[in-house]
Image: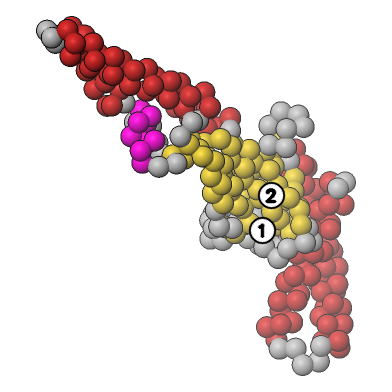
């Protein structure tokens, strides 16, 4: 930007303020040619990102936590699709294990300053055979090839220009269930009806039987190993029950 201003001033001075004819023509032609080259370069940068190159930035995986109650053995992710068949979702989950309430994530920001970046951001989820629920973001950006190109064509904006950003939330298939807002409400009503002493007693018997079978198969297992196994089985059983209740 500064170089463009300087060249423009040089063109003005060389053509209008230099009295010597030969000097005026030589310097005027040089500065005019340089300014034209600069304009061509700026145009190429704006239309084809000349002087820049694509770079992919992938964040570390970060663990996320269920939107449900801490007392619930089932882990839940609430995901509402934006539009139809877009594979782009607004999701609700907890960022930390000790959070009291789940937070809404990936809701498009409609402010003028943030709208362009929101349009380029897609959030989706996958259900895989994994132990933890995580999120990971992959950004593709334009960056300057060198400081020379930056000094020539930068107009004060950031060093990076976002091309697209994709955040993928991955949840374990056996211990997590993905619901939309309506299914979450349906589940809440269903669990309130089924939350009785008879159901709890039946679940307790199932856990006792699982513990007995595990100890027979693993006679040297410690108490902590048995506890971890039962907690995992509780999550699996609770997840299966939820999927049955909502028809998934």
Q: How many numbered circles are shown?
A: 2
Residue found 69% across the figure and 54% down from its top: 170
Q: Are marks 2 and 1 in contact (CB under 8 Å)?
A: yes
Residue 41 inside the magenta-drawn segment: no
Residue found 59% across the figure and 47% down from its top: 138
| Nearer-the-camera pick, 211 or 122 | 122
- Residue interval drawn in magenta: 147-155
- x and y, in percent, of residue 151 in the image: 33, 34
Disc 1 element: loop
Q: Quadrant of residue 89?
A: top right
Residue found 48% across the figure and 24% down from its top: 44
For the N terminus, the quadrant is top left
Q: Quadrant of residue 225?
A: bottom right
Residue with the mark numbered 1: 133
- x and y, in percent, of residue 178 in the image: 74, 48
Q: Earlier in the sequence, mark 2 or mark 1?
A: 2
Mark 2 vs mark 1: in front: 1
Disc 2 element: strand
Find residue 77 and name its label.
2
- x and y, in percent, of residue 69 in the image: 64, 56
Above or below 170: residue 205: below
Q: CA distance from mark 2 to mark 1?
A: 10 Å
- x and y, in percent, of residue 70 in the image: 63, 60
């Amino acid at each position: 930007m500064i170089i463009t201003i300087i060249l423009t001033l040089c063109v003005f001075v060389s053509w209008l303020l230099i009295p010597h004819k030969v000097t005026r023509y030589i310097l005027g032609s040089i500065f005019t040619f340089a300014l034209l080259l600069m304009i061509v370069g700026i145009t190429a940068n704006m239309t084809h990102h000349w002087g820049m190159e694509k770079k992919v930035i992938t964040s570390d995986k970060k663990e996320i936590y269920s939107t449900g109650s801490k007392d619930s053995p089932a882990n839940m992710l609430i995901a509402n699709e934006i539009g139809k068949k877009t594979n782009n979702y607004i999701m609700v989950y907890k960022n930390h294990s000790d959070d009291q309430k789940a937070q809404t994530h990936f809701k498009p920001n409609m402010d003028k300053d943030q709208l362009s970046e929101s349009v380029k951001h897609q959030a989706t989820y996958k259900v895989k055979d994994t132990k933890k629920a995580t999120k990971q973001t992959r950004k593709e950006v334009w960056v300057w090839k060198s400081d020379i190109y930056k000094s020539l064509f930068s107009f004060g904006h950031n060093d990076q220009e976002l091309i697209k950003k994709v955040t993928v939330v991955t949840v374990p298939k056996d211990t997590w269930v993905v619901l939309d807002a309506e299914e979450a409400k349906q589940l809440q009503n269903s669990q309130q009806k089924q939350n009785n002493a008879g159901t709890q007693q039946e679940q307790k018997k199932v856990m006792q039987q699982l513990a007995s079978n595990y100890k027979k198969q693993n006679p040297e297992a410690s108490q902590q190993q048995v506890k971890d196994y039962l907690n995992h089985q509780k999550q699996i059983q609770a997840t299966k029950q939820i999927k049955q209740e909502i028809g998934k």
